[in-house]
Amino acid sequence: MKDPSDALELLSSRVDQLEKRVYALEHVSEAAAPAQEEIFGPAGLATDQIPDVEASGVFPVLGKGLLGVAGAYILRALAESSSLPRFAVAAVAVVYAMAWLVWASWQKSSAKFAQVVYAGTSAVILAPMLWELTLHFKTFSPWTSAGIVGIYVALAALLFWKRDLAPVVWIGHCSAALVALSLGVATHALIPFIAILLLLVALWEYMAISGRGGATRQVVVLVCDVAIWALIYIYSGPANARADYPNVGLAALIAPACLLWAMNGVTLAIEVVFLRRTISVFEAIQAVAAFALAVSGVMYFTPGAGMAVFGIVCLILASACYAALFLRILPSEDRRNRIVFGFWSAALTLAGVAWTLPPAASAACLGAGALVAIIIGVRRGIAMLELHGLLFLVAAAVISKAPQYAFEELAGSVTAKPGLMLIAAGICSVLFYAASKERPGERWPLQILHLIPALLAAFALAALIVQALLGLAAFAFSLGVHHVALIRTFTLCAISAAFAFGGSRWGRLEMTRIAYATLAFVAAKLLFEDLRHGRMEFIAGSIFLFALTLIAVPRLVRMGAKAHR
């Protein structure tokens, strides 16, 4: 049995420990102090088992937020009553809403929940308060309400800049953007609220350059897109459909979309060209959306001179995009930046040429641009430039109506002699295809890149040959439908045979494919033209030519392949 004195001493120590534990439980703040480990000792409660003081403050924070909402209802009651001047009550309500935003910024950086609740309380107070004071009580005009939203935006940005409080700025700016859009639609005064939204976009574009962009920027930009689209949609319609909307000048209708596009473009240029960042998917899509809004605004409200000026701007920007592409982006080998800037360069060039020059000059410039692009692309091994050249060539062909002319000459009614623009488009197609170079083992997108100019060249050449043969035949006899059908069949069969041999001889796979495709076209032509409109002897001649070509094409392919080896 142990000595009684030892047992007494053990009991005394246990009592001391119990007293310390009781004291710690009664003084929680002291229990959170660094001396907590000494008080509890090894046998006491573990540190992670102590209730979190911040978590236990959730309900008080929510309670304070509800008190703020209750105060807003009191101000609402005072505004509805006639006991106090309504404008004075409205001013107090505005200050009261902003005070909650300031209080949210005064919270500790670790107290994120309190920041969110108090900033949310500020937004919950401001939004319905401005709605009623503007629409119900008519205390504020739309411009005044827009100014209040602008002050709210500036206050949130200032608080964010001072202490980098993310909850304050994203709640403040997202709520301000939605309030501006709602009030703009409800009051029919879109211009002042769009101005505030553009201010918000400018702030977030600057923050994106500073590396602070995020989801808030996307929300703000999308809301601004919707507001500008609503402006263009409403004012581009008939005047009697917007009788209750205020009259707006042309500058105010065009400027918002153009400013949005300019801000997006400047931000991307700084981020990609100077800061060497990779463009995000949202930024790429937003730039296209902003461009579409700017084009819609100019096209609807100043379709003549405005589009010409806009086309010049597009050409200047296309030159800048190509310069950035060659000097900064291609050497960096950033795939997404190369694709995006390459697409914009080509699109801006096409738009600028189409909107600035007349059709003949547009086709000539695009044809020349296609040849320059294919030559540089082949020599430097840049497939993207080859694609640009193909786009310019197709655009030049469409503008000059070369596909339509070729179809009419080969299958439709015979048209008049081709103009200089059509001949130039055909020559550009042939030169483009001659300058292009198919590489062994190419994937199917690159094969299509070579196939399209080959088709354009083949049909342009066939159409010109048909026109020349018909002109020569017209000197000898009066042309009938059966003569035209036989001449067309002869020309197509000759083209098929020539492409079959040349394609295999020069290692041009797309020419061989066109040779076989031409045979299928001739078969359809025999069925729908020769058999329906021809005479027996001419039908026999067409079938004879087609049969010889069917026999000759495979042999010509083999002969060309042997010569190629």
Image: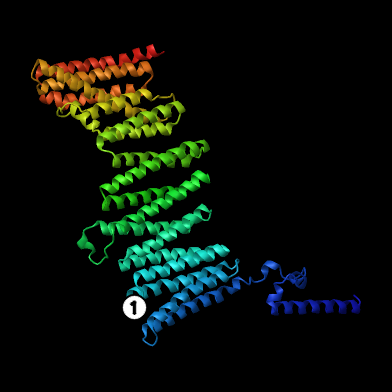
In this view, the residue in front, 310 or 90, is 310
In this view, the residue in front, 495 or 415, is 415
Q: Quadrant of residue 49?
A: bottom right
In this view, the residue in front, 447 or 166, is 166
Query: How many numbered marks does the figure carry?
Result: 1
> What x and y, as percent, mark residue 42?
77, 68
Q: Is residue 464 left or right of residue 156?
A: left
> What x and y, as percent, mark residue 81?
37, 85
Q: Can residue 301 be seen in this view?
A: yes
Q: In which quarter of the image is residue 471?
A: top left
Whether residue 24 is situated above or below residue 441 in the rendered picture: below
Q: Which residue is drawn at 39% across and 14% down?
A: 564
> What x and y, as percent, mark residue 419?
20, 28
Q: Residue at x 34, y 51 (%)?
A: 294
Quarter that holds the N terminus = bottom right
Whether residue 291 is situated above or below residue 145 in the rendered picture: above
